[in-house]
Amino acid sequence: MKYRQIILVSLFSICIFLFANSQSQLRESLELQRLEIIKRIESADKELQKLSNSKVKTRQELRALESKIKSREELIDNIQEDLAITTSQLTENQNKYAVLTSDIEAVKKQYHALLNTVYKQSLGYNKWTFILNTQSINDSFERWVYIKQFQAYCQKAYKKLQTSSKQVALSSQNLEKSIDRKLELLNQQSQQKETLAKDLVIKDDLLKELDLEENKLNAILKEQKLERERLNTSIEKTIIAALTGKTNVTSSTEEIGELSFSERKGLLSWPVDNGVIISKFGRQRHPELDNIYIQNNGIDIQARIGSVAQAVHDGKVVGVQEVPGFGKSIVVKHDGFYTVYAKLDRSYVDNGEEVGVGQRLGSIDVDEMGLSTLHFELWDGKTKLNPLSWITK
């Protein structure tokens, strides 16, 4: 029976050890996850700081904020999971402390009773008198064995008391650590929830700002579409007029026998010096509005302020118009092809004037953003072409 109890106690102790070890490993895993989540939050913070320097709120800023919010929610879940483990361990440590405290009280009572017995016995007899005051040597030997066993029992009881005292002290320390950790996690959880609430308010405000910006951009986009249609109509009228002979146009290249316009595909000069193409030909994704596309009939080239548009080939000016949203636009005919130079603030040529390659046609306007951008188109009759396939790389 005694051995069975020892086996059961040993198995119970092993189970507790394995459970505590698994919880410790899980906690370490949670702490590593928490550090990784915190790194993601810090990274999103840095990205938001860079984006917030801009006066215009963007979808990119919203995405960075949403990423930060998602990571913070994961962090709160992580803390909550760790808190559940810590609460479980705290309950376990409290129960263990209560059991050990109860056990040590029982051990103390037994030990004190034992000391009291020893003390009373020491007053009533001498050890050797007790051993020798017998009728036979066997009786004396039995009394001697009894005294030895009693002394061993007393030492064992003393050691048990010491061990129990150490276990209680260790359990008390673990209990205090569990309490401190739970308080720390509760504080972290409270701080993260408070910060999350602030982030959600910022997100709500940002969404409202973005809705306003989107409405403004949609209005601008609508106006720009109308402006492109006006420019397109103006160009088509000019080309039709040239085709029907209302404007007498001849190409100087035909007279001197140089390469024709069509033969110079990929070799045409740039319409501006030192420019950068910021918008290409055809259907383009809007830079700020999601799922919105714009149709560009030409290319847009950002140039230095004070730059001028220049003819890409010899030809004749067949149109100089003022188009709302595109400023002054100049149309030059080259054989059966036409080049368009728009967003000018001043024209240096007149309708019907012969121009040579590289000739200054007009100065490029400066927009409200302080940028100087030339809009350039190329037509074959009434068909729009991609200018990038024609100008030199």
Image (cartoon, rainbow, N blue to C red):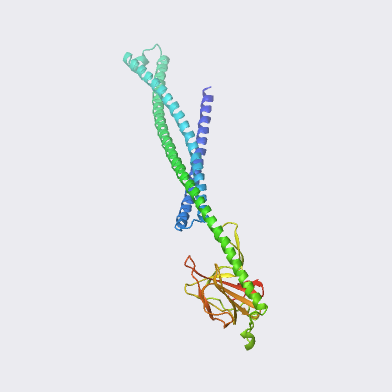
In this view, the residue in front, 355 or 22, is: 355
Q: In which quarter of the image is the C terminus?
A: bottom right
- Residue pushed farthest top? 135
Choose between 391 and 48: the one closer to the eye.
391
Residue 120 vertical position relative to residue 13 in the rendered view, above or below: above
Residue 312, image x, y percentages: 58, 79
Left or right side of 253 for 24: left
The residue positioned 52% from the left and 35% from the top of the image is 19
Up-down relation of residue 267 to residue 78 (above or below): below
Give the image quarter of residue 143.
top left
Q: Quadrant of residue 219?
A: bottom right
Tell me if I can see residue 63 in this picture: no
How many numbered tags mark residues here? 0
Q: Is residue 239 left or right of residue 309?
A: right
Residue 133, compared with residue 279, is above or below; it is above
Residue 226 placement, left or right of 199 = right
**Is residue 282 at all visible to an observer of this figure?**
yes
Q: Nearer the viewer, residue 263 or 196?
A: 263
Q: Where is residue 215 in the image (x, y as percent from the top left)?
A: 54, 55
Q: Which residue lies furthest to the bottom in this view?
A: 256
> Which residue of the protein is positioned furthest toward the front in this rendering?
246
Please provide percent x and percent y for residue 214: 54, 55
Residue depicted at 44% across the width and 38% down the height: 186
46 and 92: which is toward the camera: 46
Q: Is residue 181 left or right of residue 347?
A: left
Toward the left, the furthest residue is 123
